[in-house]
Image (tube, rainbow, N blue to C red):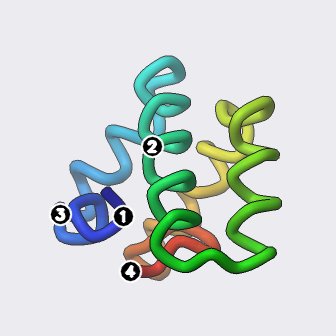
Amino acid sequence: MARWFNSQSRLVQIILLIIPVVNWVVEVTVRWSAFIKNKSFITLITAIVVTFLGVFVGWLDAIWCLLFKHMIFAKA
């Protein structure tokens, strides 16, 4: 899922991360798929935080995607 998200255009990424409910769904699926792929401690912590605070982290990720074209700690 992280690879799919990163392959989208920046405009699509930003739109997905700005809409609140869609934002949370995208954040949770990308973060947990990144954890399943990488199995690192930082991706686990990020996935757990996003599960509960995904909307707020999503807005931070929207800014991060605008600058770097991938989510924080979820580069494929």
Q: What residue did someone put label 1 on?
A: 2
The type of residue carrying mark 1 is Ala
Q: What residue did someone put label 3 on?
A: 9
Q: Residues within 10 Å of mark 4 (few under 14, many from 20)?
A: some
The type of residue carrying mark 2 is Thr
Task: Tell me what residue is drawn at x 62 percent, y 44 percent.
Answer: 59
Location of residue 70 with respect to 5 vertically, above or below? below
Q: What residue did someone put label 2 on?
A: 29
Secondary structure category for the residue under label 3: loop
Location of residue 29 with respect to 9 vertically, above or below? above
Whether label 1 touches label 4, CB < 8 Å: yes
Percent position of residue 21, x then y: 49, 18
Q: Which of marks 3 and 2 is nearer the N terminus?
A: 3
Secondary structure category for the residue under label 2: helix
Q: Real-space Cα distance between discs 2 and 4? A: 13 Å
Q: In this view, does 63 lie to the left or right of 14?
A: right
Secondary structure category for the residue under label 4: loop
Label annotation for residue 71: none
Between label 3 and label 1, give the one nearer the viewer.
1
Location of residue 51 with respect to 73 vertically, above or below? above
The type of residue carrying mark 4 is Ala
Secondary structure category for the residue under label 1: helix
Percent position of residue 20, x then y: 53, 22
Q: Real-space Cα distance between discs 1 and 2? A: 8 Å
Whether label 3 touches label 1, CB < 8 Å: no
Q: Which of marks 2 and 4 is nearer the N terminus?
A: 2
